Amino acid sequence: MAITALPPDTDADIARVTEALAMITPRWNVRILLALSGTPLRYSELAVKVSWLQNGQLHPKLKALCDAGLVERTEHTARNVTYGHTERGSALLPVLPMIVTWAEEHLETADLPLPAIEQIEDSLTLLTRRHAAAILWVLKSREEVSGRALARIVMPSSDGTNIYPPLRQLVADGLVDTDGIGMPYRLSAAGDGLGPVLGALSAWSAGQPLNQAAQHPVWGHPQAKPAPRPWVSSQSRPTPATLPSVRTMGTSPAWHNRDLFSHATTARPKAALPAGGPRR
């Protein structure tokens, strides 16, 4: 079933990316995926790596990741069950350094250095705003669009005024710009900078190699970047100690899995957040 008034292939592309984001954005999912990098682990071994999760929290998270096709459960014997990445789960991991690169350029620098894992989690929260993927797609392909036109494209079966709450949220998040009420909307520097991330997610969700992102019909063509509008990352969360290495692609930035958990988090001053800014 179509979710927008865009052509069927574009509509399907947006739906796949939205679904991919929904798989990994829930709290702790990325950390569990990273903890499973390398040799498959027994439940007790994985629980040690994600020890900040309370009793009863890990199992439903693992089940959801298995249902999403990112993690596989292998029953060797009745008492020997291991968890590891599926091929699809492993193929998704190189998207993470792209998110870190985007966050380091466009998220406002906090008072204390943030572990890259928190940069990823904050960024994913922004990308899963309601209708965010579709709105960003339209603005990227058409440069400037009125709110009324966006409503017809993004929410063809809804009241036209329903487009404004998600638009205002994206403006507050710094991904979309406008010159005022009644004026067209366009991508900000941060919104346009999401090209490599959304292009890679599109390629992954379509079962293609991530290096196909550069050929994406929308996100493969960067625009001239307007002045950036940074915002503050959300408050820090507990981080595990060290995790095994993540296999990355040659086209990904040079980083290692341990970098995601660098700057071990301590209590840091809570930064002032603008209304509608990234929160957990």
Image: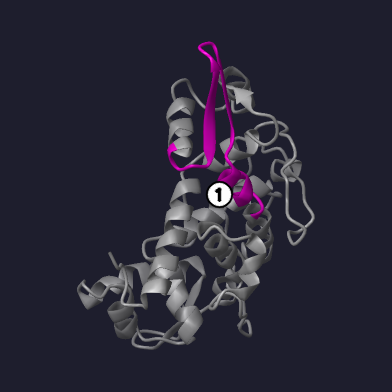
Relative to residue 264, is residue 201 drawn left or right?
left
In-front residue for pair 37/119: 37
**Could you tell whether 115 is left or right of 26 in the image?**
right
Residue placed most toward the observer, 5 or 79: 79
Q: Secondary structure at mark 1?
A: helix
Query: What residue occupies the far front of the structure in this picture?
Result: 76
Three-letter amino acid code of the residue under disc 1 = Glu
Give the residue at mark 1: 121
Q: Looking at the rendering, in which quadrant would you find the N terminus?
A: bottom left
Give the image quarter of residue 257.
top right
Q: Is residue 272 visible?
A: no
Could you classify mark 1 by the number of other residues whose Cα lies within 10 Å: few (under 14), some (14-19), or many (20 or more)?
Answer: many
Q: Single out the residue that lies furthest toward the top.
A: 79
Identity of the residue drawn at 59% across and 76% down: 189
Q: Is residue 126 visible?
A: yes
Residue 34: horizontal and vertical position, in percent? 64, 39
Res. 245 image quadrant? top right
Rendered location of residue 132, percent (x, y): 42, 66
Farthest residue toward the right? Answer: 254
User: Vertically, is 52 above or below 114?
Assistant: above
Q: Residue at x 46, y 80 (%)?
A: 139
On screen, residue 47 above or below 262: above
Residue at 65 percent of width and 32 percent of height: 240
Look at the image and give the residue range highlighted in magenta.
67-94
Image quadrant assignment for residue 82: top right
Q: Nearer the viewer, residue 62 or 8?
A: 8
- Magenta span contains residue 34: no
The picture places residue 45, in percent across and down from the top left corner, at: 63, 20
Residue 17 point in image, percent of width and height: 47, 60
Is residue 100 rendered to the left or right of residue 237? right
